[in-house]
């Protein structure tokens, strides 16, 4: 049979098996876009959309309203729980469907029509193994099929320096854009009030019960007196006044520290220009190893934070972090000058060694 004839037979088979969208429209069957525009968007308030963006929440609401929906076999919300998939599927003797809670346009939905010794038969007739299903669930959790590529995982936001912004209003947190409670916002008072004040707080969103459980199993109790002291300090309005004062002070000290670095450090050094906090990031020429530099500085009772400390792969070895939280005295200026001198010495040694090799 010729190729055109094969194509014609395939087209004829498709026409006989499936209805044309136009024919469905004539008998009143709505397409997804028409349904969304003409009914869902028109008759539902915008603030309720997150309820249907989360399919698990939609199912729970439908069950509460007495609407019949397919049985919920199980829920997997974390990567380490993917290995439990085979045990969950033992509860189901026939077909089932795997879908992401925040899927986009039907992506990520896998329909299994039946189970057999050959494996799990998909709706397209192909068979999948339990490893295939586990990989698919793992991809769902990684956000491969989610709205905007959003992963179905929690975001832990550390906002410990946010209150020390030099200008107002302070920078917005990710939590301020969170509509479904997936951001856990963490902060504390050790950076704003005092390093010995170990009082922090957490806004856990939808993870409140899990956060409470982890708190109870990790520490039986927290120090009460520091919490009460901080609470009273904040309630009486002292905290806001304190933040305004220290922010102005840190901004002045930032400018002084930058001037010292520009004066004493090797030419070509890069300097950050922070808009808050009390930490300065400095990038020295590539030939300077700040880990070795810190070892030399220890002989002068001076310590800096090498950039490699802030990289899991050992990057930023030519970088260091300077702290300007304390009052900047002539002794501190002398320490910064020593850091610059030793950095220049190391740079000269490396360049002389390179010339000798040539």
Image (spheres, grey):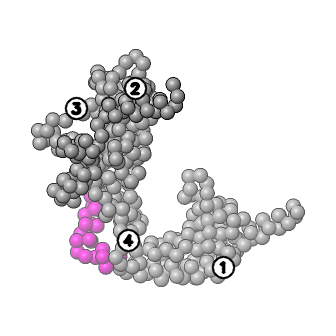
Q: Mark 1 and mark 2 in contact? Answer it, CB < 8 Å.
A: no
Magenta segment includes 239 = yes
Q: Is mark 1 on a helix, strand or loop?
A: helix
Q: Give the CA distance from mark 4 to mark 3.
A: 45 Å
Q: Position of residue 24 (x, y in %)?
A: 24, 41
Q: Position of residue 343 (x, y in %)?
A: 69, 70
Q: In this view, does 6 lie to the left or right of 199?
A: right
The quarter holding residue 299 reads: bottom right
Q: Give the CA distance from mark 3 to mark 1.
A: 70 Å
Q: Find disc 1 in the rendering and name its residue.
A: 264
* Mark linked to residue 71: 3
Q: Give the CA distance from mark 4 to mark 1.
A: 32 Å
Name which of mark 4 and mark 3 comes first in the sequence: 3
- Nearest to viewer (mark 2 / mark 4): 2
Q: Find disc 2 in the rendering and name its residue.
A: 125
Residue located 42% across and 26% down the image: 126
Q: In this view, does 134 lie to the left or right of 332?
A: left
Q: Mark 4 and mark 1 in contact? Answer it, CB < 8 Å.
A: no
**Against 333, is 350 above or below?**
above
Q: Find disc 4 in the rendering and name its residue.
A: 171
Total numbered labels placed on residues in the image: 4
- Nearest to viewer (mark 3 / mark 1): 3
The reply to whether residue 357 is visible in this rendering is: yes
Give the camera-side residue of 1 and 154.
1
Name which of mark 3 and mark 1 comes first in the sequence: 3
Q: Is mark 4 on a helix, strand or loop?
A: loop
Name which of mark 2 and mark 4 comes first in the sequence: 2
Circle 1 packing at 10 Å, graded few (<14), some (14-19), many (20+), is some
Q: Give the CA distance from mark 3 to mark 2.
A: 23 Å
């Amino acid at each position: 049979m010729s190729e055109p004839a094969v194509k014609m037979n395939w087209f004829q088979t498709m026409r006989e098996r499936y209805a044309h969208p136009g024919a469905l429209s004539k008998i009143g069957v709505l397409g997804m876009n028409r349904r969304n525009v003409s009914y869902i968007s028109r008759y539902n308030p915008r603030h309720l959309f997150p309820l249907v963006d989360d399919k698990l929440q939609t199912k729970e609401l439908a069950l509460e309203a007495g609407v019949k929906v397919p049985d919920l076999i199980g829920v997997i919300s974390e990567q380490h729980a993917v290995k439990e998939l085979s045990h969950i599927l033992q509860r189901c003797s026939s077909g089932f469907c795997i879908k992401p809670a925040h899927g986009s346009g039907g992506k990520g939905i896998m329909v299994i029509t039946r189970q057999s010794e050959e494996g799990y038969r998909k709706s397209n007739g192909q068979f999948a193994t339990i490893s295939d299903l586990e990989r698919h669930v793992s991809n769902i959790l990684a956000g491969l099929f989610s709205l905007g590529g959003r992963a179905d995982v929690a975001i832990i936001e550390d906002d410990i320096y946010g209150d020390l912004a030099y200008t107002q209003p302070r920078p917005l947190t990710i939590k301020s854009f969170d509509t479904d409670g997936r951001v856990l916002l963490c902060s504390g008072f050790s950076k704003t009030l005092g390093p010995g004040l170990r009082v922090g707080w957490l806004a856990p969103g939808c993870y409140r019960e899990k956060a409470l459980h982890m708190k109870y199993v990790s520490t039986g109790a927290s120090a009460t007196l520091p919490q009460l002291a901080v609470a009273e300090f904040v309630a009486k309005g002292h905290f806001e006044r304190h933040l305004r004062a220290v922010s102005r002070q840190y901004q002045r000290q930032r400018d002084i520290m930058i001037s010292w670095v520009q004066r004493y450090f090797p030419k070509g050094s890069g300097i950050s220009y922070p808009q808050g906090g009390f930490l300065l990031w400095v990038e020295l020429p590539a030939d300077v190893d700040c880990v070795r530099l810190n070892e030399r500085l220890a002989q002068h009772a001076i310590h800096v934070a090498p950039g490699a400390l802030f990289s899991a792969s050992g990057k930023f070895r030519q970088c260091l972090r300077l702290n300007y939280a304390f009052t900047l005295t002539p002794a501190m200026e002398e320490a910064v000058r020593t850091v610059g001198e030793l950095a220049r010495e190391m740079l000269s040694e490396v360049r002389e060694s390179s010339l000798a090799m040539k």
